[in-house]
Image (tube, helix red, strand yellow):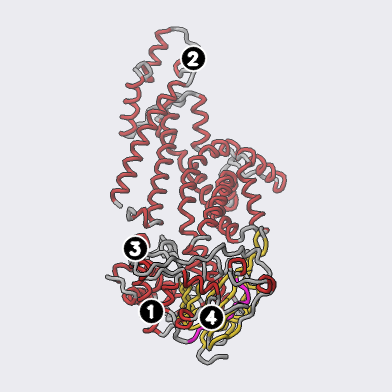
Amino acid sequence: MNADAILEVEGLSTVFFTPSGLVRAVQDLSFTLRRGEVLAVVGESGCGKSITALSLMRLVPTPPGRIVSGTVKLEGRDLLAISEAEMRDVRGNAMSMIFQEPMTSLNPVLTIGAQIAETVRLHRRVTRAQAWDRAVEMLRLVRIPEPAQRAREYPHQLSGGMRQRAMIAIALACDPQVLIADEPTTALDVTIQAQILDLILQLQQQTGTSVLLITHDLGVVAETAQRVVVMYAGRKIEEATVEDLFEFPLHPYTHGLLGSIPHLAAISGAVAERLQEIPGMVPALSNLPPGCAFAARCDRADDRCRADVPPLVELRPDHIVACWHAGAAS
Amino acid sequence: MTGYLLRRLGLMLLTLFGISIIIFVLLRLVPGNMVDILFDSAGLVDPAEKARIAAELGLDKSIPEQYLVWINGLLHGDLGISYVSEKSALKEILPRIPVTARLALSAIVFAVLVGVPFGVISAVKQNSAIDYGLRVVSLAGLSMPSFWLGLVVLMGFAALTGTLPVYTEPPKTTLEAFLLVAVPAMTVGFRSSALIMRLTRSAMLEVLRQDYVRTARAKGAGAGRVNFHHALRNALLPVITVIGLETAFLIGGLIVTETVFNIPGLARFLVESIRNRDYPIVQNLVMLTAFIVVTINFLVDLLYAALDPRVRLGA
């Protein structure tokens, strides 16, 4: 076991039993979140990132979903092996989560303060008044103006950005060791996105919480994370430090993702450059091809790619990739 | 909030005014005239006598005039005189109110206490054996008319215990007194409980899929807290509307049940009075019913405001 690891995920597989067949949402996923770092999980919609997050929290809707194998060790304790009651004690306490939709993730009939205080009351032996004070303190921490008054307001009285701040306040109210942020800025205006990311980063540094940041936005990754896991069709296909990934993307899919980010020089017209697109579509998770899931969209693909799933190999220091033809683009 | 209340209150008064006109006109359109009935039954033949009876009952005036007399009396607490018993209509109606009120209230309480929790269980255990069982029971509840159910219950009682839970003489034991209310109340309330259960179930299924329910789980809240504190409070909004509407339907069920169980309540009295064309009783009873239904709807609006801050704060 890695000494500075806080969360170790090993061989995690989550499937969904649907009328159209078995959907392998997450397959044999392993990664390690280190103490105090921000680890980004990147991928397109439907690549299994959100299901990964829900699996870690054991919140996958069951049925139809089920975690079929793997271990999720939080400070050495396997969360997949403990009872539901023990897991309830972990959720919102040692490990908490913020969601993509701030507009719908707060209960419309309860005040903001009550929703934050609830988390505190669930995990700490405090009085109602102490929990409320903590709620107001958290609202101040996430920089909501007039926190004492806002605590008595309802979600519909707050803007989207304010609601996401309130969600962060709920998630951090019990000083979790791990914060899972599932697309925390996707539903927000661009200007608000930057504020929320800044806030998460500042609080992360202030509290020492380790953050698992799930996003489809490589711009967000570049600004916030130290390391990245790239997922495609339920599998990890590449993992590296942010610098190394941006400089030496080894998987053709990562390469394509980076190529699809508009550069300022191109936008301003200084350089004539077309945005690259990745041809084709993500394969249906209920009907994955036998070999590499990306083969159908890949210009490097050959018969081996279509027949066998490539293993993860460390091609550069701290940089692993699953591709038979890994390396810079030809 | 005050604006919301005033709007609701204004709407309530307007509705009552409209209902009073409809009741009055409808009653006058019903074929068969009280004067004729009294006239014939008394064996009279003199047209002058007939005119005297009409004048005595105020039926010689024009319909708008009769309406004004009625409304004016209503506002002053004078409900007129029953044509049949020739007693004050108020004295006929008042003693019957507690009998029916107790039955109706017990029925609704039963319906809610059964419907809401079982609806929640059915939703939380969706597609399980419990869910299927409860759905079959509720479908049966919706399909069985209360008069038929009432008769079956009475026959069952007679066959099993040899006694009937019907009003014959004052109850001797507490159990008897309880059964006298509980059995008819359950008979009337069963249909409502079935409806409330189905609605609670579908509202809960809807709410349980919401993001904020997932948030509650992510906080570490247990199943009970998630289902009742977070989900049910949101799911109750449509259910409360239906509970309000059900009380109106309940009155229909009461008419038959009071007859079947021989309960001297308002609903049975209403049917007798309609048969006798006893206008002062009928129009006041229907007006009372309308007033109750409208008041319950007003209370439902108040409950809405209490439960949903978006209504209360005018989002």
Determine contact: label 4, label 1, CB under 8 Å.
no
Q: For the residue marked with disc 2, what is the amino acid?
A: Ala
Q: Considering the image in quadrants, where does the C terminus of chain B appear?
A: bottom left
Q: Is residue B221 left or right of residue A289?
A: left
- Calculate the distance from the C-alpha at mark 2 to the C-alpha at mark 4: 103 Å
The magenta segment:
A26-34
Q: Are marks 2 and 1 on the same chain?
A: no
Q: For the residue marked with disc 3, what is the amino acid?
A: Ser
Q: Which residue is mark 3?
A: A159
Q: Residue at x 57, y 43 (%)?
A: B188
State whether the magenta stretch is mostly helix, strand or loop. Answer: strand
Chain letter, disc 3 residue: A
Q: Which residue is mark 1?
A: A201
Determine contact: label 3, label 2, CB under 8 Å.
no
In what element is the residue under mark 4?
strand
Q: Position of residue A269 (x, y in %)?
A: 34, 66
Q: Position of residue A152 (x, y in %)?
A: 33, 66
The residue positioned farthest toward the right in the image shown: B159
Q: Which mark is residue A36?
A: none
Determine contact: label 3, label 4, CB under 8 Å.
no
Can residue A94 be seen at all in this image of the molecule? no
Q: Are marks 3 and 4 on the same chain?
A: yes
- Calculate the distance from the C-alpha at mark 3 to the C-alpha at mark 1: 21 Å
Q: Is residue A162 above or below residue A124?
A: above
Going from N to C along the chain, the mark reached first, 3 or 4, is 3
Q: Which residue is mark 4?
A: A239
Q: Nearer the viewer, residue B127 or B299?
A: B127
